[in-house]
Amino acid sequence: MKPTIRRIAVNTGGGDAPGLNAVIRAVVLSGLRRGWQVVGIRKGYLGLLDEAEDGLIALDESTVRGITHLGGTILGTSNRGNPFELPDDEGRPVDRGPQVAESFHRHGLDALVAIGGDGSLTIANRFYREFGLPVIGVPKTIDNDLEATEATFGFDTAVATATDAIDKLHPTAQSHERVMVVELMGRYAGWIALHAGVAGTADVVLIPEIPFDLESVCDKIRRREANGQHFSIVVVAEGAVPEGGEHVFQTYGHGQKRLGGMAEKVAEEIRRRTGKETRHLVLGHLQRGGQPTARDRLLSLRFGAAAVRLAEAGEFGKMVALSAGGIRAVSLDEATRRVRTVPLDSDLLQTARDLGTCLGD
Ligand code: F6P
């Protein structure tokens, strides 16, 4: 049965990704066309807990004008904003889920379009399952690691940025006859590293799905050396692991751990084993910035409009997903079940092997 909708909300949670603003614009314009009011919740769910009452912003045509091409999110976001485990002043987790649900109803909201990656969509699903909130999910993440959708928006832009960076490393590596090791994001999935590594014609690509053997990496560099190619480009996914080894993490304030640092370790070992001058860099958050590519903008606009159609049809507890070129609805349960990693029989991995790229095995 179609629900009666007068007022919907949209929020953005977790790490930002290029295309968030395009989704927001599509949700707002599609909602307004149906005669609904649309409000944005600031910083994920935190805006619903904002006692100053400015955690919600009314969104109209003027607020979403000229934002399709902008990176970031006009609503703000947080990846430390899980309302079920919100840190108090001493950093202890407090469950504020019930307050969020109460605030949602108090503000007269009839649906929520939650734009997020696996963390934010898991939170959205809890609100749907445990509190009955009418939630629709939109898959966002540069990592492209969400189950049940062939692509998330933000990924294409991140790959373009990373490929551009690899292109820029080539001339300096060649001129100095160095090995350049670049670390790319992606958490426990190698999508960004594999796509950018192949597009940027890296000599070695190390992804989490294939534990690497440093001797195989060094052999590749030695073979290139013997062929008169005195430089090499090595792409390392932040979640890559050596055979029998472990992930590398960096610790930030409040003891938060984030993947990072594998490129430095790989570079040091390559230098030690081959004697080649070696440099490393971490591309980091540059991969999340910048203008979304046309492909990401289109995916974002399609996802946002489709999410509003789902809300209109009362199909809550679902996420919009890309499937065989079209958009379909999948349950949030299915969408958040597990991380989508690169299949070992994927065509792109096979292509990399056929081209002679070393995958570290
Ligand atoms: O999930 C997106 C992502 O950019 C990952 O690729 C990366 O590991 C992580 O977020 C970095 O998070 P933060 O913004 O907290 O440094």
Image (spheres, grey):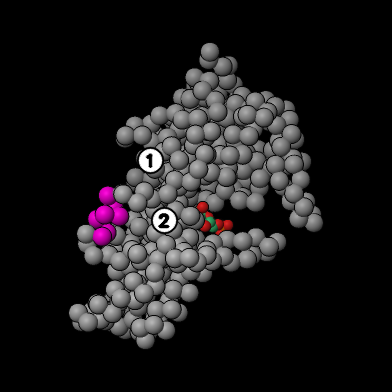
Q: Position of residue 189 (x, y in %)?
A: 44, 53
Instruction: Tell me the residue that label 1 is attached to.
Output: 150
Mark 1 CB lies closer than 8 A to ligand 1 = no
In the image, the segment drawn in magenta is 347-353
How many labels, in total?
2
Instruction: Tell me the residue that label 2 is attached to.
Output: 209
Give the Cα separation between the discs numbered 2 and 1: 18 Å
Q: Nearer the viewer, residue 237 or 282?
A: 237
Q: Is residue 239 left or right of residue 202?
A: right
Q: Is residue 201 left or right of residue 284?
A: left
| Sequence order check, earlier mark of 2 and 1 | 1
Residue at the limit of the structure toward the right, as seen here: 90
Q: Main secondary structure of the magenta part?
A: helix
Q: Amino acid at mark 1?
A: Glu
Q: Nearer the viewer, mark 2 or mark 1?
A: 2
At x 21%, y 59%, the residue is: 354
SS under mark 2: loop
Q: Amino acid at mark 2?
A: Glu
Using a 10 Å C-alpha cutoff, classify the residue at mark 2 as few (fewer than 14 neighbours), some (14 to 19) or many (20 or more): some
Residue 278 lies in magenta, yes or no?
no
Using a 10 Å C-alpha cutoff, classify the residue at mark 1 as few (fewer than 14 neighbours), some (14 to 19) or many (20 or more): some
Residue at the limit of the structure toward the left, as seen here: 227
At x 57%, y 61%, the residue is: 258
Q: Position of residue 254 (x, y in %)?
A: 70, 61
SS under mark 1: loop
Q: Is residue 320 above or below residue 255?
A: above
Tell me which corner region of the image, top left, top right, bottom left or bottom right, holds residue 39: top right
Q: Position of residue 34 (x, y in %)?
A: 49, 21
Q: Is residue 276 above or below residue 108?
A: below
Q: Position of residue 199 (x, y in %)?
A: 28, 59
Query: Is residue 8 at least partly visible in the picture?
Result: no
At x 30%, y 66%, the residue is: 358
